[in-house]
Image (cartoon, rainbow, N blue to C red):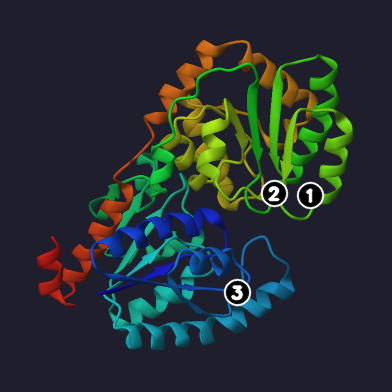
Amino acid sequence: MVFVMAAGGTGGHVMPALAVARELRRSGHEAVFIGTLRGLEARLVPTAGFRIEWIRMGGWQRVGLARRMRTAGEFPLSTLRCWRLLGRLRAAAVLSLGSYVAAPVCLAAFLRGVPVVVLEPNATPGLTNRWAGRRAARVLVNFEQTAAFFDRARVDVVGVPVREEFFQVPPKVPGEWFELLVTGGSQGSRTLNRAARESWPLFVGARTRVRMVLQTGPAEFPELALEFERSGMPGRVTPFLEDMPRAFAEADLVVCRAGAGALAELAAAGKPAILVPFPYAADQHQLRNAEALARAGAARLVEDRQMNGHRLFEEVCGLAARPQELEAMARAVRRFARPDAARRVAAALLEVAGRSGLDGESVRTEQ
C-alpha cells in the first residue's frame, strides 16, 4: 500500500513523519511525501531515500498581507494537484503533521474519501490539525492535555516518533569538562546565538570548565565563528549538526527551543535541558510544551525575553554545580519517551486503510 505523508516546513514536522515512513517501509509499504521546495522537506526527504511530490503552498499565520494573498491563490491549485496525486498513487491513507503543507493534502483526502490520521506533536494543536482533526479517522497526540481539542473517542496518546538512534544514547558519564550543547534548530535561533555570544567572556573570565558546542544555523555562522575563535571559549561553532544523536551523547546539558520534535529527542536520549520557547509559535505551543516538561521536573524553562548571556551563564553554572539535579532531570524527561511511537502511528495508518476498504486483505496480512 501507498501512504502519503503531509509534513513540511520545519524539522519538527518532517522528522517524525520520516520515522513513521521508515516503519512503513520495514512493513513492506511505500511512503510518499508531499511538500514544498522551500521547506526542510526538500532536503531531508530525498536524503532519507523517500519520494516527494511538490506543491506550491505558503503560510497563513504570522505572515504579511501579501503572503496571505499568495497563499489564498495557491490553495485551490495545490488542493487540485493533491487530489490528482492521491488518485494516481491510490493512496491508502494520509498522515497529517499539520502546517501549511498539510492543509491542501487533507482537504483533497476528504474530498476523495481517503482516510486521514492526524498526528499532533504539540500541547496546543495548530490551525491545520485542529481543523483536520474534526474529520480525521484517528487523532494521535503527544500530550494527554491535547485530547481536549478533539473528539476523545478518536484520540490516542502515542508520543512523537523519533529516530531510533536517540534511544541508543547512553547515559553521560561526567568528565573533566562540562559539555554544553546550544542549538536553535536547523535554521538557528537569534536569541540563543546572542545569549551564547554574550556568555563567552563570562565563562572564560570565571575560568569555568565548560565547553560549548553552538549550532548557529547558516545565516549567523560566519560572524559567530570569527567571534568564537577570538573569545578563547573552549568548544566549537557549527552551522548545522548532521549527527544530532552523537551531539546529544556528548552533551551534559542541552539548551534549545521547545518544539515537539526537539522535546521528543531529549526524552528519548534522556537529556536534561534548558528550554527557551520560540515566542512567536502559533498559539504559544512551544511555551505550552516547555511548561509540561518543567512541571514534571524534566527541564528548566527560560522565556525568550529573559534569555541573555548572563542568564545563560548563571543557569549553566548552577546546574553544572548540582549533578544530582541533572540526574533527576534526566530521569524525569525519560518518562516522556515513547519508543513505540513510530510503530503505533504506522499501525493506525494500516488500521484506517483497512477500515476504508482499500486493500483490506493486505492490511489484515500485516496485522
The answer to which of 14 and 225 lies nearer the viewer is 225
Q: Nearer the viewer, mark 1 or mark 2?
A: 1
Amino acid type indicated by mark 1: Phe
Give the answer, above or below, for where 342 lies relative to 101. Answer: above
**Residue 335 sits in quarter:** top left
Residue at the disc numbered 3? 37
Say which label, 3 or 2, has the lower sequence index. 3
Quick check: 319 left or right of 50?
A: right
Quadrant where the N terminus is found in the figure = bottom left
Residue at the disc numbered 1? 221
Q: What number is the disc on residue 188?
A: 2
The answer to which of 127 and 14 lies nearer the viewer is 14
Say which label, 1 or 2, has the lower sequence index. 2
Q: Nearer the viewer, mark 3 or mark 1?
A: 1
| Position of residue 58 measured from the top left corner of the image (x, y, whole percent) | 61, 72
Give the answer, above or below, for where 323 lies relative to 316. Answer: above
Q: CA distance from mark 1 to mark 2?
A: 9 Å
The answer to which of 193 and 49 lies nearer the viewer is 49
Quadrant where the C terminus is found in the figure = bottom left
Residue at 69% x, 65% y is 63
Amino acid type indicated by mark 3: Leu
| Position of residue 146 measured from the top left corner of the image (x, y, whole percent) | 39, 45
What secondary structure is found at the residue carrying circle 3? Answer: loop
Quick check: 41 left or right of 93?
A: right
Quick check: 237 left or right of 120?
A: right
